[in-house]
Image (tube, rainbow, N blue to C red):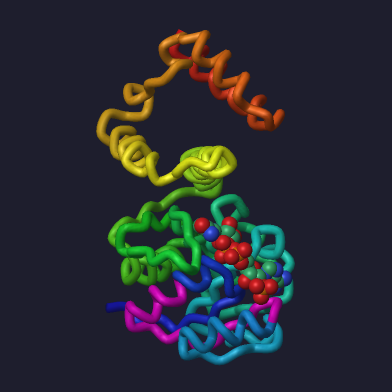
């Protein structure tokens, strides 16, 4: 097993899950810095680590992972002067080169999964998309990532952004539509759990048949009457727009 000494910047969903995965893989998380000291303290306690008061205190050795809001990554990197440590971020959409302002050795470890602190994740099944500034850095990154997951993929920044866009469609948009369905049924005094088998089958079938072949429903069939009836039942104008757009997109796709 590879042993790396880890320092973490950020204490949100990804920091929590990656931090726990590092620990489970037998590595030491030696330091945590985050914008809100209480959040850093909570994560440090979870990971048996110590809290730092500023990014400038991060030790220049091992791995330094910035798992912070995308917009903050470049400015955090700008506060570092790492000569020895491998500096990583975990974002799907931030270019790798922004890390060059804070480190000689840098790369990206993007875990392609949706993380929430309350929800356990089997990190061994999470695809880790890897990018590094040179071959030695890539070798170190691969040995770190192999200790966490069985699914490692080397990708450049452009392809990582494309995977991130697809992930937004596959996870964020689908989940938002589920939240719309839940909100609608709640408002009508009806049960969301009636849909659970359908929701599970939607994902299972999309993987088994491919999503294009799996599509059913009024828009796929061109059933105008059902769609008009649905539109008459929706009171939220934004949801009505969403219904029209998605139905039109499905119709155009299968025409
Ligand atoms: N959540 C996901 O499903 C997911 C999946 C893959 C990749 N990612 C990527 O992983 C990164 C972290 O995402 P997340 O979901 O963990 O975000 P999050 O839960 O919203 O947490 C963001 C963290 O960034 C910290 N932060 C913000 N500005 C900071 C600054 N100037 N200095 C230090 N820390 C700062 C916040 O600190 P405080 O709480 O201390 O204020 C917070 O702990 C992002 O790049 C995101 O794109 C997320």
Residue 253 rendering spot, x and y as whole percentages: 48, 15
Q: Residue at x 47, y 40 (%)?
A: 170
Residue 152 rendering spot, x and y as whole percentages: 35, 57
Residue 191 rendering spot, x and y as whole percentages: 45, 43
Instruction: Judge whether residue 72 is colored magenta.
Output: no
- Where does the magenta region start and end? 18-36
| Quadrant location, ligand no. 1 | bottom right
State how many labels appear: 0
Q: Is residue 168 visible?
A: no
Give the vertical position of 134 relative to 21 (above or below). Answer: above
Give the vertical position of 139 relative to 36 (above or below). Answer: above
Considering depth in this image, is 44 or 229 the residue closer to the camera? 229
Q: Residue at x 33, y 83 (%)?
A: 26
Q: Residue at x 42, y 76 (%)?
A: 20
Q: Residue furthest front?
A: 189
Give the vertical position of 146 relative to 152 (above or below). Answer: below
Q: Is residue 236 visible?
A: yes
Considering depth in this image, is 50 or 144 the residue closer to the camera? 50
Left or right side of 80 for 13: left
Which quarter of the rendering shows the N terminus? bottom left
Left or right side of 92 for 143: left
Instruction: Judge whether residue 28 is colored magenta.
Output: yes
Q: Residue at x 39, y 81 (%)?
A: 23
Rendering quarter of residue 243: top right
Left or right side of 152 for 177: right
Considering depth in this image, is 199 or 62 the residue closer to the camera? 199
Residue 59 rendering spot, x and y as whole percentages: 58, 87
């Amino acid at each position: 097993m590879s042993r790396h000494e880890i320092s973490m910047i950020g204490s949100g969903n990804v920091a929590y899950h990656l931090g726990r995965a590092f620990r489970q893989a037998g590595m030491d998380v030696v330091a945590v810095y985050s914008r809100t000291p209480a959040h850093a303290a909570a994560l440090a306690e979870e990971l048996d680590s110590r809290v730092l008061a500023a990014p400038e205190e991060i030790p220049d050795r091992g791995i330094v992972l910035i798992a912070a809001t995308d917009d903050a990554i470049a400015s955090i990197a700008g506060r570092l002067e790492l000569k020895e440590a491998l500096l990583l971020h975990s974002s799907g959409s931030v270019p790798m080169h922004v890390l060059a302002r804070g480190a000689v050795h840098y790369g990206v470890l993007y875990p392609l999964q949706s993380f929430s602190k309350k929800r356990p994740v089997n990190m061994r099944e999470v695809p880790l998309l890897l990018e590094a500034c040179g071959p030695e850095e890539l070798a170190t990154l691969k040995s770190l990532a192999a200790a966490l997951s069985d699914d490692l993929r080397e990708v450049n920044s452009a392809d990582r952004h494309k995977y991130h866009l697809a992930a937004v469609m596959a996870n964020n948009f689908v989940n938002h539509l589920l939240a719309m369905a839940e909100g609608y049924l709640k408002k009508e005094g009806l049960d969301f759990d009636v849909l659970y088998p359908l929701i599970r089958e939607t994902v299972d079938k999309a993987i088994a048949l491919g999503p294009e072949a799996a599509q059913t429903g009024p828009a796929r069939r061109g059933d105008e009457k059902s769609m008009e009836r649905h539109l008459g039942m929706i009171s939220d104008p934004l949801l009505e727009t969403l219904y029209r757009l998605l139905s039109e997109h499905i119709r155009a796709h299968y025409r």
